[in-house]
C-alpha cells in the first residue's frame, strides 16, 4: 500500500475573537486521530519527503493558520485533526492525492463489472465441478453426443418439453434451432415455416412474437402419439434462461435474418456464452468469422456432395465438421482425415452409431437420445396405453408422420406402410443375445386372404430395419409367420437374400377378425420356439438352428396388401 498526503489551505485552525469573529491561528499544534472522539492518537506521520518522522506526531500550523502538508499512516485516506491537545473538537480531513487512486479504482471496477466471472464463483469455473457444461471438456469426449432437436423423435422437437425432457434423461448437450419473428424475436423452431410442426401455416417471419406465442401451437401427436399435449413455440431467451449453465447448446440460426438477433442476445445477456454454446451452421454461412471472433467454436455441416475445394475455402473458420449419416463411408473417412473433429447427424439407431464411430466420427447428433443412451425397457404397455411414443420404436423413415407407428386408443399400435415394412422394437431389445422370450398380441380387424401373413422377427444382431421379401443387408434373423389361415411358421432370413428358408410349421385355428392372437417366441442358444397361447391349448413349432443370435426384434406387416388388413399389435413384453 502507500501513504497519502494531508494538509492544505483547506485545513486550518481558527478560534473566536472577542467579538466572536473567526480568527486564523498560526503556530497551533495539531494532532491526528483515527476516531472523531476517544481512541488513540496517530503518531506515524512523516514529512513531505516521505521519510522523516514528525516528532510526537504533532504538526504546527503555518503563519496563515493552515495545516502544513504531511503523509499519514500507510493506507489511511482519512484522519481527524485536533488543535486542542486531544480534547476536541476534531475535524475530519481527507487525503489530497486521491485523484489517481479514484481513477485506478474506477478502471478496476469497470473491468470487474465487464468480467464474465469476476469472483470465480460460476459453477463451471470451480475446480471441483468437472461435470458442469464446459465446451472444451465436452468436445474432448469420444464420442461427444447431443440431442438432435432436443431428441425430436422422442419429444416434441424444439419445444421446452423436448429440451427439459432430454436434460431430465441425462443428455449433456442439446441442439437448438432458431428463426426470427416479424418484430425481431428469436424463437426456437426448425423450419422457416409453421407448416410441418404446428397448427398454422406460413412463414415464422410473418408473425409477431406476441401473436405467435398466443395463437400458434406445436402439434406432435401425429409423430409421437395423441397423448402429447400441444406445445408453445419458445423464445430463444426463455430457452437459454432455462438451459444455460445446464447443458452444452448447439445453436443454429435457420435463416440469415436470425443471425444478428441471436448474436445481440448472446452479447447482451450471455457474454460468457462461448464457454458452453457452440455455433452451428451450413458451411457457406458468412457469419462464422465474426462468431469465432467472439470466442465461439463453430460446427459447420456439409452435404454428401460438398467437395474438398469447397471445404478448403472455409476451413479457417471451422472447428468441427458436420456430415450427414447418409454420406458414403469413403467420403466420411476423407472428412475425418482432414484432422478436425467430425460430428454426424442425425443418428437414430445403434447401427448408425456403430458405423459412424467405426469410421472415426467423434460426435453424434442423436434424434433418439433416450433410446441410444438409457437402459432397455421390458414392456411398452404403460406408454402405449397413455398414447405416448416409447423410445426405440424404429421405422425406415424418420421425422415422418406417415411412417410413424400409430398408437391406437385401445393401447394397440400399427404401421400404415405396406410392402412388408416393420417396426423395430429397439427400446425393448433383449438383455442377452441368445436367451430370451418375446410375447405380443396381434389382431387383424379385417382378415387378409388365408395365405397372407404378418410376422414377428427375432434374433437380429443389429437394429437395422427388416422388410419381408427383401434382401435385408445388415443382419440375418428369423421371422415367425402368423397366416390368416392359422398356420404358425418359422423361417430363417439370411442377409442379402430376398426369400426366407422354412424351418418349421404348425397348423392352428384361423384367427377371428378383431380378436387378438397371442404369440410367444423363445430364443435359446440352439432353438427358435414359437407358440400360440391364446386358445387354452398351446400350439408350438420348434426350429433347431443356431445361425443367428441377437437381442433385436421387429413386428412386421408381412405380406398383407391393404391398410385395412395391417395388424394391430398390443401388450408387448420381453423377458
Image: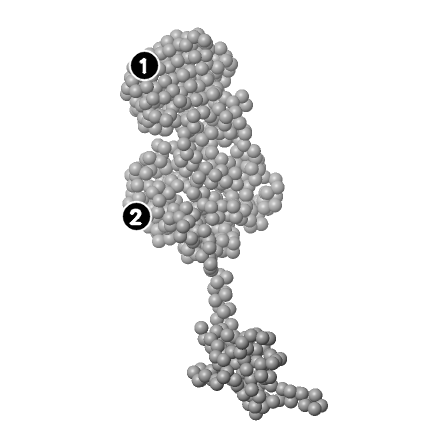
Q: Which residue is mark 2?
A: 339
Image quadrant in which you'd find residue 206: top right
The CA distance from mark 2 to mark 1 is: 50 Å
Image coordinates of residue 418 in percent, x first then y, are 44, 22
Image coordinates of residue 560 in percent, x first then y, are 43, 17
Toward the viewer: 223 or 140? 140
Mark found first going from the N terminus, 2 or 1: 2
Residue beneath the point at 41% across and 26% down: 428
Image mark for residue 543: 1
Q: Residues within 10 Å of mark 2 (few under 14, many from 20)?
A: few
Image coordinates of residue 543 in percent, x first then y, are 32, 14
Give the SS element for disc 1.
strand
Residue beneath the point at 46% across and 9% down: 535
| The N terminus - image quarter | bottom left
Q: Residues within 10 Å of mark 1 (few under 14, many from 20)?
A: many
Q: In the visual, does 263 lie left or right of 83? A: left
Amino acid at each position: 500500500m502507500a501513504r497519502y498526503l494531508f494538509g492544505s489551505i483547506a485545513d486550518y485552525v481558527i478560534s473566536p475573537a472577542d467579538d466572536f469573529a473567526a480568527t486564523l491561528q498560526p503556530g497551533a499544534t495539531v494532532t491526528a486521530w483515527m476516531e472523531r472522539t476517544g481512541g488513540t492518537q496517530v503518531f506515524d506521520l512523516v514529512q513531505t519527503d516521505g521519510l522523516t518522522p514528525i516528532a510526537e506526531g504533532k504538526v504546527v500550523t503555518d503563519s496563515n493558520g493552515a495545516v502544513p502538508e504531511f503523509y499519514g499512516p500507510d493506507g489511511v485516506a482519512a484522519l481527524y485533526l485536533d488543535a486542542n491537545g486531544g480534547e476536541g473538537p476534531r475535524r475530519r480531513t481527507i487525503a489530497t492525492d486521491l485523484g489517481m487512486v479514484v481513477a485506478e479504482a474506477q478502471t478496476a471496477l469497470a473491468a470487474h463489472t465487464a468480467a464474465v466471472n469476476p469472483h470465480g464463483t460460476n459453477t463451471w469455473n470451480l475446480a471441483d465441478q468437472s461435470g458442469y457444461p464446459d465446451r472444451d471438456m465436452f468436445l474432448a469426449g469420444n464420442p461427444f453426443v447431443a440431442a438432435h432437436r432436443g431428441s425430436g423423435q422422442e419429444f416434441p422437437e424444439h419445444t421446452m418439453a423436448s429440451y427439459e425432457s432430454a436434460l431430465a434423461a441425462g443428455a449433456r448437450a442439446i441442439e437448438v434451432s432458431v428463426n426470427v419473428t416479424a418484430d425481431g424475436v428469436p424463437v426456437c423452431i426448425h423450419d422457416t415455416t409453421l407448416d410441418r410442426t404446428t397448427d398454422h401455416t406460413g412463414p415464422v417471419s410473418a408473425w409477431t412474437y406476441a401473436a405467435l406465442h398466443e395463437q400458434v401451437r406445436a402439434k406432435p401427436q401425429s409423430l409421437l402419439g395423441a397423448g402429447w399435449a400441444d406445445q408453445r413455440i419458445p423464445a430463444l431467451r426463455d430457452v437459454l434462461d432455462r438451459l444455460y449453465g445446464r447443458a452444452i447448446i448447439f445453436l443454429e440460426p435457420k435463416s440469415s435474418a436470425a443471425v444478428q438477433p441471436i448474436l445481440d442476445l448472446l452479447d447482451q445477456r450471455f457474454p460468457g456464452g462461448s464457454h458452453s454454446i457452440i455455433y452451428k451452421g451450413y458451411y457457406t454461412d458468412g457469419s462464422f468469422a465474426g462468431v469465432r471472433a467472439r470466442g465461439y467454436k463453430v460446427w459447420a455441416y456439409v452435404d454428401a456432395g460438398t467437395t474438398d475445394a469447397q471445404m478448403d475455402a472455409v476451413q479457417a473458420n471451422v472447428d468441427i465438421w458436420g456430415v450427414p449419416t447418409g454420406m458414403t463411408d469413403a467420403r466420411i473417412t476423407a472428412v475425418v482425415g482432414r484432422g478436425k473433429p467430425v460430428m454426424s447427424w442425425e443418428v437414430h439407431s445403434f447401427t448408425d452409431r456403430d458405423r459412424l464411430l467405426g469410421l472415426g466420427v467423434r460426435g453424434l447428433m442423436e434424434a433418439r437420445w433416450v433410446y441410444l443412451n438409457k437402459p432397455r425397457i421390458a414392456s411398452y404397455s404403460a406408454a402405449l396405453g397413455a398414447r405416448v411414443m416409447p423410445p426405440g420404436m424404429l421405422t425406415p423413415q424418420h421425422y415422418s408422420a406417415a411412417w410413424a407407428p400409430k398408437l391406437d386408443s385401445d393401447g394397440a399400435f400399427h404401421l400404415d406402410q405396406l410392402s412388408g415394412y416393420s417396426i423395430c422394437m429397439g427400446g425393448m431389445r433383449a438383455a442377452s443375445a441368445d436367451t430370451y422370450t418375446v410375447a405380443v398380441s396381434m389382431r387383424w380387424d379385417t382378415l387378409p386372404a388365408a395365405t397372407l401373413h404378418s410376422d414377428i422377427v427375432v434374433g437380429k444382431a443389429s437394429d437395422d430395419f427388416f422388410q419381408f421379401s427383401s434382401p435385408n443387408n445388415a443382419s440375418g434373423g428369423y421371422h415367425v409367420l402368423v397366416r390368416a389361415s392359422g398356420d404358425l411358421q418359422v423361417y430363417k432370413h439370411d442377409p442379402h437374400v430376398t426369400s426366407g428358408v422354412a424351418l418349421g410349421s404348425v397348423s392352428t385355428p384361423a384367427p377371428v377378425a378383431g380378436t387378438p392372437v397371442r404369440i410367444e417366441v423363445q430364443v435359446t442358444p440352439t432353438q427358435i420356439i414359437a407358440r400360440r397361447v391364446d386358445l387354452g391349448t398351446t400350439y408350438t413349432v420348434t426350429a433347431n438352428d443356431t445361425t443367428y443370435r441377437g437381442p433385436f426384434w421387429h413386428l412386421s406387416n408381412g405380406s398383407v396388401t391393404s391398410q385395412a388388413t395391417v395388424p394391430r399389435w398390443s401388450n408387448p413384453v420381453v423377458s
